[in-house]
Amino acid sequence: MARGKIAAEKNNGANLGFEEKLWQAADKMRGHMNPGDYKHVALGLIFLKYISDAFEARRSYLSQEVAKTGSPMFVKEPGAREQIIEDPDEYAAENVFWVPEKARWSFLQARAKQPTIGKLVDDAMVAVEQKNPSLKGILFKDYANSALDKQKLGELIDLIGTIGLGDQESRSKDILGRVYEYFLSRFASAEGKKGGEFYTPRCIVRLLVEMIEPYKGRVYDPCCGSSGMFVQSEEFILAHGGRIGDLSIFGQESNPTTWKLAKMNLALRGIEANLGPHHGDTFHNDLHRDLKADFILANPPFNMSDWGGDRLRNDVRWKYGVPPVGNANFAWVEHMVHHLAPQGIAAFVLANGSMSSNQSGEGDIRKNLIEADLVDCMIALPGQLFYGTQIPACLWFLSRDKKNGKFRDRRGQTLFIDARKLGRMVDRTHKELADEDIQRIAKTYHAWRGEKDAGKYEDVAGFCKSAELKDIEQHGHVLTPGRFVGAEEVEDDGEPFEDKMKRLTTQLSEQFEESAKLEKDIRENLKKVGYGI
């Protein structure tokens, strides 16, 4: 049931416009806390609200079922009904976490104004982890910290309590899941460069997923951040009528706090994934050493210089060349190729420099990848898409099998797409790809691959080009799309050249006259106040 004005305002439509109001209200309660610290406070409470509401919904259902005469659950033995309602297995069977009484949202919200609310929330988190081993060590448990204003904490609990579930459990998950993701994105923006390490903009993830269409198989992200790639993969499957169980998810994250965010993000949506038993450095402690993935989705840290490459000079993963110690870009690329199944496809984000750099052997690695016919598609992205970095970025698509029997044989060819002119500004500093931009790019790729119902592919000057291996060789194995797609064709407006030049020069002459008049007026006004020039 929706509670409170914020939830009620938008609870009847798919467009959850209350997210921004919720964020603004929550951010006001942050006080002097650093966004990076407050992130765990707010997201932890949203997670607790979710599992508590899911628990209460399941509990209500069980109560109704055991009360029905003739129901399969109906039993005559004294106390048996209560045993069913209090049986943790009845909740686990529906992927619902068991929430002890002192951790339930109603219990905490009733005590939100008490000065001990911080300790009560810590105790709640501990109790949830004790009853649910899969959450052990995941939840934030520092709400009693003296630096956290307890009055503001109580207000935040009341605010999050206004996020209503609605009548349907599926909608409940959608609302709280989207609020969680929205808060992730806003914290990423607030934290700047550091925030970009745990959050990849939704539009970029959507584009990657729409391109490679991970319907069935093993999906892997070696630097999974807060698990946005996995969430979008699951949403894609549901949107296209597929089955969630057809995907097996594997990930790894080196940052311990981000690993916890990822585990919470997946648990909040009921997504099962193997992120390893703990956080871990992908290069030095590969937790999925034997994995061969059908789909790889990733947004590795750009131009990472301190990846410890000096200790991995003879690693088995460097089949196409030893990556430089001072930049991990191609270490990530070769790591992903190493984990790619025989018919697998990898889609990932890299800094633009990866397309053209020849420093420290990077050009040789790129050349070897091209000549091995692994490079399927390259996309140049617009600027200002990412939080905390102005480094221009691109998308790489690597395929082990360009002769896939389901599609057109594209061996010896690479698709180049220049999407730098696409996108729209959403605030002063950030841009995003609109739905139509994502669909245009994805449909171009699917048509090029010869997928059913994707239409016929054609080169479009200034936007896309299907290039042969010899064309790439002529460009020195540089993969910048702008080198291949050419200039956009300008439509002829039909005005004769002589007429156009006469009109433009007349217009320019009028502007020169206006400029001279303005200059004269400015000089006279400066002279009047004693500053003649």
Image: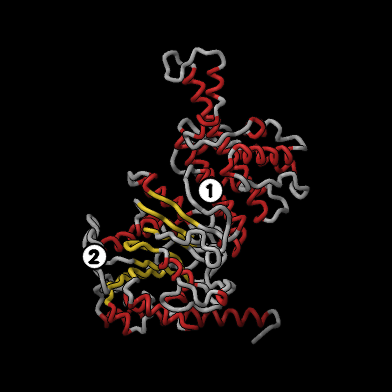
In the structure shown, which secondary structural element does the residue marked by tag 1 occupy?
Answer: helix
Q: In the depicted view, which residue is nearer to us: 475 or 411?
A: 411
Q: In the depicted view, which residue is nearer to us: 256 or 321?
A: 321
Q: Which residue is mark 2?
A: 457
Q: Which residue is mark 1?
A: 265
Q: Residue at x 33, y 66 (%)?
A: 400
Q: In the depicted view, which residue is nearer to us: 40 or 409?
A: 409
Residue 495's disc number? none
Describe residue 324's horizontal placement relative to residue 475 as left or right. Answer: right
Q: Quadrant of residue 482?
A: bottom left
Q: Is residue 362 visible?
A: yes
Q: Residue at x 77, y 37 (%)?
A: 115
Describe residue 341's horizontal placement relative to residue 1 as left or right. Answer: left
- The alpha-carbon separation of the residues under discs 2 and 1 comes to 38 Å
Task: Provide residue 464's location: percent of width, then percent of height.
Answer: 31, 70
- At label 1, which amino acid type do we have? Asn
In this picture, is 205 found above or below 313? above
- At label 2, which amino acid type do we have? Tyr
Task: Provide residue 17's location: percent of width, then percent of height.
Answer: 50, 44
